[in-house]
Amino acid sequence: MSLKVWVWCIWVNYLFGLSLGAVRYYKFDVEYIFHKPDCVEHLVMAINGQFPGPTIRAQVGDTLHIALTNNLFTQGTVIHWHGIRQYGTPWADGTASISQCAITPGETFHYRFTVDRAGTYFYHGHYGMQRTAGLYGSLIVDLAEGQKEPFHYDGEFNLLLSDWWHKSSHEQEVGLSSIPFRWVNDPQSLLINGRGQHNCSMAGHLINTTLPQCKFKGGEECEPQILQVDPNKTYRIRISSTTSLVCLNFAIANHKMVVVEADGNYVEPFTTDDIYIHSGESYSVLITANQYSNKNYWISVGVTGREPTTPQALTILNYKTTVSSDTIFPTSPPPNTPQFDGYNATKAFTHKIIALKGTPKPPQQYDRRLHLLNTDNLVDGYERYAINNISLALPTTPYLAAIKYKIGGAFDQNPPPENFSADYDIFNPPVNHNSKTGNGVYMFELNHVVDVILQNSNELHGKVSEIHPWHLHGHDFWVLGHGEGKFKEGDERKFNLENPPLRNTALIFPYGWTALRFRADNPGVWAFHCHIEPHLHMGMAVVFAEGVQDVEDIPADSIQCGLAKKIVMNNKHG
């Protein structure tokens, strides 16, 4: 069977074979625990006493049933299933004020949804900045029985990358919402599967460090994880970034990697020494254990995209023939993280990612196009991010219920602007600092093809423009292209309409633009936002809606708040 036919068969199976799977049940208790992710004890948001939360594993076509109990005492919570498109179950997307009400303390909410495509995904809190507090875990979907991956491997590992602060997420939220403005600053540590080392110098003989918290005796919560491999075997490493702020560079000493998957979609394999991974992104890479088997090797994760003050996170690749416990730590230094502002290297890596042959191609034409300019502004003296001069402030009634049941007064009925002023100077701080909050919605016709041109600009102060990873709920999109400066007439000629990658998270580079295309074919209301947690908290987001009247009746337990509560009460007593 040709590779193209094979991929087509997989897509047909996704569309028509989803009702044949099993029901997999999980019970999640969300709670705070005392934990030492980076050898320093702090409160961590955990699930069932675990940090990170339990890994969910399912097959294509399975239905997941997660009973989530909020044991946080004073906070609401929800969980978003990042990368899962929620066809037919938009209320299970896990976005407070968009798909559902927040789950109140002591309440149990039941998420039920079908997973329709194999891939590397994760889940995380989507209420306030709870991802920063540690509320996340892995979600892996395997192919259905009888299906095979388009590549071979002998074993696999799963790595969840994150950043970690000693300042609580609540304190960070308050600082971001204060006058004077208080930025979160750099994380104290990076974590791999919830493990890091604060202020430990591990670039050598770790065992000789003078820091007592780094003299590992075995079994510590923060000691580096060891990935054991057999010589000459090939391994799949699934890598996801749940970071709240930083962009990361991932490398394995002396080992090449072959990238084969991005955000749950197969890509044309390519070989690289390192990968750049940003918040919200997932990859699968293949490595072959073909180096000297009498040595161990560092796996390093370091900050890129902003000047780092955070030490690398490290994990150990251990060849099973290396058995002596006193030689477990590699004697060679870990790979160096590239220059933090080396955007050309990040762009070069991004441009290598193209869709595997046989992946559906984008429609050649669009029905509607949005130009979304992200800016850093002031709203009544508070620093906020804005899109086309509107900073998103979520309503108290979930959009899904408000639109489905035509609840008046729940949100602003005036749609947000679809473009920005042609004379806006993206290379300098805004002349007019003032913006406003809003909660209007971009409404799309069902099955229309939508283009989104993301436009980056200068920050409020200084000469600064940042990378922003934008994530779309409920869909994948084709990444048609990137460009420098302001998007202009004729830039469409740069679009890749032949083999653009399908992603759910895409980068917009400093002072540049990114073009996305998707089909609005999933009835529901969906968030589209920067996946950097402080930026989302400050309003860098918009809301899309399509075909909401085609959504089946929304489960009552998801909309018992705001104006929607009256709908639930009327239905109970009608």
Image (cartoon, rainbow, N blue to C red):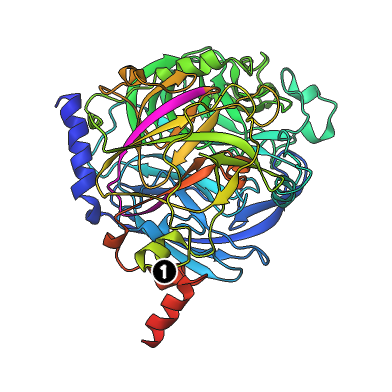
Look at the image and give the residue range highlighted in magenta: 512-526
Quarter occupied by the N terminus: top left
Answer above or below: position of 525 versus 401.
Answer: above
Answer above or below: position of 525 versus 375.
Answer: below
The residue identified by callout 1 is 407
Could you tell me which residue is drawn at 46 percent across and 77 percent down?
566
Across the whole image, how many numbered discs are drawn on residues? 1
The x, y position of residue 13, in whole percent, is: 20, 44
Q: Nearer the viewer, residue 73 or 452?
A: 452
Q: Amino acid at mark 1?
A: Ile
Q: Nearer the viewer, residue 426 or 100?
A: 426
The x, y position of residue 153, in whole percent, is: 36, 27
> Is residue 517 found inside the magenta-colored segment of the image?
yes
Q: Secondary structure at mark 1?
A: loop
Q: Residue furthest bottom?
A: 573
Give the side of residue 10 with respect to residue 564, left or right.
left
Q: Is residue 67 visible?
A: yes
The x, y position of residue 272, in whole percent, is: 46, 15
Could you tell me which residue is drawn at 56 percent across and 53 percent down?
393
Quarter occupied by the C terminus: bottom left
> Is residue 196 found inside the magenta-colored segment of the image?
no
Answer above or below: position of 321 versus 560.
Answer: above
Toward which corner of the image does residue 399 lie, by quadrant?
A: bottom left
Could you tell me which residue is drawn at 55 percent across and 41 percent down?
389
Give the side of residue 286 with respect to residue 210, left or right.
left
Give the side of residue 146 with respect to residue 209, left or right.
left
The x, y position of residue 9, in whole percent, is: 17, 37
Toward which corner of the image does residue 354 lie, by quadrant?
A: top left
Q: Name the main secondary structure of what is drawn in magenta.
A: strand
